Amino acid sequence: MRLSERLSKLPPYLFVEINRKINEKKARGEEVISFAIGDPDMPTPEHIIDSLCQASQIPANHRYPETSGLPELRQAVCEWYDRRFSVALDKDREVVPLIGSKEGIGHIAFCLIDTDDIGLVPDPGYPVYAIGTMLAGGSVYSMPLKEENGFLPDFDAIPDNVLSKSRVLWLNYPNNPTGATAGLDFFQRAVRFAKAHDIVICHDNPYSEIFFDGDPPVSLLQAEGAKEVGVEFHSLSKSYNMTGWRIGMAVGNEKLIQALSTLKSNLDSGIPQAIQQSAITALNSDPEVISKFNQIYRKRRDLIIEVLSDIGLEVTVPKASLYIWAKVPKDYTSIEFTASLLDQCGVAVTPGIGYGQYGEGYVRFSLTIHDASLIKGLSKLSMWKDNKNPFKSKR
Ligand SMILES: Cc1ncc(COP(=O)(O)O)c(C=O)c1O
């Protein structure tokens, strides 16, 4: 059987060896505590589930949904954007609901990229930006996110011959995996850059509601002129613990939203309407619902950082997102350090290299681990010893 060349171009799965080790340990009956998964451990709030249950009893919701989603959902998205970011959106032209934001992030590449076009992709970054670009037949130009630049891309470092072929600029703040945030001034710069080079901005913003210190994260669409060049992807997954229900949205530039809707109407048949109803309930929730989750995440962040510092890891304290991006000790690669934590402590983390070459030298800890496991995991983690530099123990 011959599979498409397109599929063979997908990058190798870098976690094979680590996953093999995790499975081996588990098969021996050893406990592995995972800080590796970015999937909220807390359940979807009860009032949201109640509305899903009620909506599922209504026969009209048993039929095919429209790709464009319920008008009431698009209206709820507009009202939420207005309340949260003071951004006005037209519910009939500037909003499309998604089957989780990942779906739209992957699909929009087919609206923007032809063979030989380039997608500008952050590295380290959520892998779907690059994979969508590749599947659509384009090439990826990696924009390094370096610590000395606050994990923001340096637009001036992108060569002219790359810019002339670039069709899309991917951004993601609060950032997975670095936990970095970006202010409005950065998005304003990005909009000017995109306009100057005729490049579309796709901003992926699923973590905007998960913040701990300082001002709430911003939307790309708050930047002046952003709607002329960009769209923003958003998700109910992380804010309302709804990863399993699969619902998100893209908002912004009318031409891009209509292009994505057209593509989607040829590929999928929308989001189950009962889930759309639950999303309306979620978006209309008291903001206190999210604040309570954030208080829990903040406590976990502080506990993890304390232990990481104790074992000698350098960490930038994240102001937002669900992740802690920690530097691995000297003389270790991210895969080696991940293996060392697993072998010595029975703790699983994500090696930075899995997010791109500039993720080397880091590992990612996720805050989505419930409190009992967290405490156990931290006590195991505190036992870690630097076998490569035994005399340089920082403790
Ligand atoms: C940066 C980023 N974007 C998008 C997604 C996808 O979220 P969903 O498809 O659940 O909306 C994730 C999930 O982990 C993510 O980390």
Image (cartoon, rainbow, N blue to C red):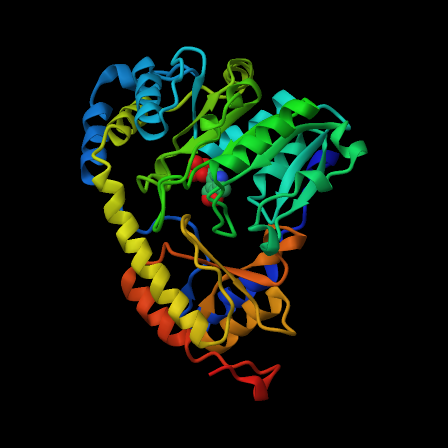
Q: Quadrant of residue 219?
A: top left
Q: Position of residue 256 (x, y in %)?
A: 55, 18
Residue depicted at x 46% and y 36%? 205
In this rendering, the answer to whether 18 lies above or below 239 is: below
Quarter occupied by the N terminus: top right
In this view, the residue farthest toward the front is 185
In this view, the residue farthest toward the top is 92
In the picture, measured across the screen, residue 379 lies left or right of residue 150, that is left
In this rendering, the answer to whether 276 lies above or below 120 is: above
- Can residue 44 be seen? no
Residue depicted at x 42% and y 15%? 68
Identify which residue, 282 or 361, lies in the foreground: 361
Identify which residue, 91 or 44, lies in the foreground: 91
Q: Position of residue 155 (x, y in %)?
A: 67, 38
Q: Position of residue 157 (x, y in %)?
A: 72, 42
In the picture, measured across the screen, residue 276 lies left or right of residue 285, that is right
- Can residue 17 be seen? yes
